[in-house]
Image: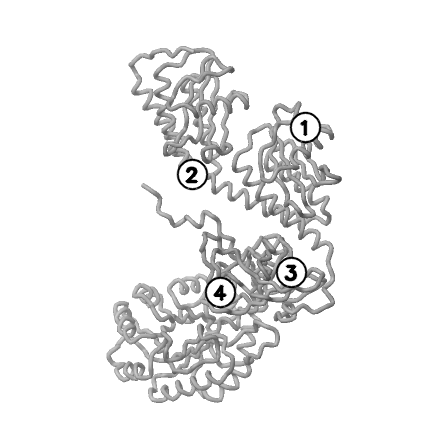
Amino acid sequence: MQISSSPQSDQHNDALNLTLALDQIRDSVGVPESAAHMFSDILRLLVQHFDADGGALILLEEHGSEPEAVIIDNLEQGEALDLCRAAMMQEKPAVIDNPYWENAIGTKIAMRNQALGGMILVSRQQNFTERSLQLLEIAEKQIDSAIIQARTLWKLAQRERELNALYMVSQLCIQHESQESFLHALAQYLADDFNADLVLITAPAANQSSIRSVVNHRNLASEALIKIANDAAPIKAAQILPIPPGQTELLLLAAPLNEGTLQDGDVIIGRDAWFTTGDQRLITAVVAQLDIALTQFTRINTPLSLPAQLISEIERAPLDHTVCYRDNQLYCNEINLSQIAIQHGTPAYVYNLKRVLENYNALHTALPGAEIHFSVKSNNNPDILRALIAAGAGVDTVSAGEIHLARAAGAKADDIVFAGVGKTIGELYYAISRNIGWINIENPAEVAAVNAVAAEHGCMVRVALRYNPDVAANTNKRIATGHHAAKFGLTEADIRQILDNSNQYSNIHFEGLHIHIGSQLGDTLATQQALENTLRLAKAYPSISTLNLGGGFPAMYAANAPIPTLQAFADAILPLTGDIHLILEPGRSIVANAGILLTRVLYVKQQGDRTFVITDAGMTELIRPMLYGAYQAIVPLSPREGPPKLVTIAGPVCESTDIFSEDILLPPLEPGDYLAILTAGAYGAVMASNYNARLRPPEIVIDETGKQAFVSRRRETWHDLSIRDVPED
């Protein structure tokens, strides 16, 4: 091929026009769907601009990987890939020697000096010029910028595609009564999603593959299908298979089902278009979910009876009328928790709204004259907040963010208490400007700050001073807050100093005292002592008409745990308070036993004399056991038959302390089994984190009827992890 010289006239305009045209295409991209077409538009523009007969563009995710995208215009698939790979070897735009076309030019596409693709243009009608090579170099630089822009959008689209596929696997499993119909429906779904001519789902039989389900739009002979299945059998990871004889245009992508399980086999997809790295990731994700679905499918549709022998951890678990086993399946009200785990994946939180309202009403019954403010820090799920607010509850908040969530859930400003040991000036501005009902003060300097902000707004603020009564509560020392060494509250001397000089704070009404001696209180004695100390202090100041007792009422984490009842607290409190107005700020006692964390067994691992059960939930989802040794009962959703075994339940997080429970007796467990971590409604999801770049789990709510479940908060995505990042200039 000869490269002709080109006239100098109009060269500048030619380059400018090409750049503007490429810019216009790139600027039109704003959503993943348009990103998918952008490079096709770029290639068509170049073919037209260079008056070429055809062209091709191949993009790699990283050097040496399978293509991330293959775009072809008027070329055969094989020759296009060969030409583009040849172009990747070029240092700059040049002639591509090839057996297909007389005239072909190409260039590598490089980012940070790493070849990430190739681009070629071909023509038999005319020779390309030196100027063509210069223009091709301009186009390549524009494509570099387009890759950066499109790749983020592609990742979003890919993640959405994966989530949709995983959801469909779960849905199909739920909708079909037999494995055969489930697999047939799945094969048809995969054929549609991949725009494929062939889908095989196989399993081994007598040392060779047998086909469990097939979509065969090419009408391949059964011998050809069996050969394809057998060729795929040795693979260990998703990969492209050799083209079958006689099917020169049929490309194959295969992925293995879990090796060593009853579902051992492969999923094979065939079509006449090249498979990309995104396709490989998708089929890997689908097959992993299929493994889970097949295992759970069998167990849901073939219920096992509960072992006759009592299992220690199940016996220890606080099961009751709302969370119990039926036909060897764990239910929450009328909802089979296995179905939620399959449909929504794990880890996942499940909240029982009916139980939340039962707990709230029980507290109202025990202490009928008290004003109840739900503690948002225990659980800030929007549907729980809305339900409690609709039932008449106020809210207790400890940050401006919690005030925002409370207001979004419908709380009236006058029904919001703003507490917290370290409020910022910005938070005080936010609370006071919105006429929040109460501010609980814990620091002498905070009084002046509140007064100054209130004066600036020209309003009066109702305040309760948090008293630290120096009482040691019967609870875990990590959650005791009313003793002299705790950071919370004011001493009696501080409170007297403030109230004796209250006329200095012209924009504050000092109307209440606030105490909270700790959470999960083991008896009523410390509460009674703290209350007596506080009432004695309040009597010296007639303006104090309200007593905020905080929370601390315990939840049942283990069956038959010796904890005081609500009635026991009522009997200790009510005889002392007389006519003083009571505010309560419970959290744990309302939501703890209304929450469950679902998790899946990833591995069962023998380490010395200990058996570790590794789950997909960890300290990033529920940190209480790791933070202060809290006990959480853990039970299987569908217990297997067999003698119980001592196991340690551990999470996947890269920390030695990521252990939920050590040496507990559970039925036999296998990878894919689902577990329920009970009494997880308080200080669970609200304390979840993205440590190890893990995604925070979804929150599923079972409604007040106990019969319907819905997603209240979706699972985070990888996009959420980087959404706050500031892009490079």
| Circle 4/circle 2 CB separation < 8 Å | no
Res 30 label: 2
| Circle 2/circle 1 CB separation < 8 Å | no
Q: Which residue is mark 3?
A: 637
Q: CA distance from mark 1 to mark 3?
A: 43 Å
Residue at 41% x, 70% y is 416
- At mark 4, the secondary structure is helix
Question: Which of 125/253 is in front?
Answer: 253
Q: CA distance from mark 3 to mark 2?
A: 44 Å
**Dot 1 or dot 4, earlier in sequence:** 1
Residue 296 visible to the viewer: yes
Q: Quadrant of residue 251?
A: top right
Residue at 63% x, 69% y is 319
Viewer-side label of 4, 2: 4
Q: Is residue 648 left or right of residue 449?
A: right
Q: Quadrant of residue 307?
A: bottom right
**Dot 4 or dot 3, earlier in sequence:** 4
**Dot 3 or dot 2, earlier in sequence:** 2
Identity, as a three-letter code, of the amino acid under mark 4: Met
Viewer-side label of 3, 2: 3
- At mark 2, the secondary structure is loop
Viewer-side label of 2, 1: 1
- At mark 1, the secondary structure is loop
Check disc 2: other Cα within 10 Å, few if <14, some if 14-19, many if 20+: few
Question: Which of 31/176 is in front?
Answer: 176
Q: Is residue 697 above or below residue 139?
A: below
Check disc 3: other Cα within 10 Å, few if <14, some if 14-19, many if 20+: many
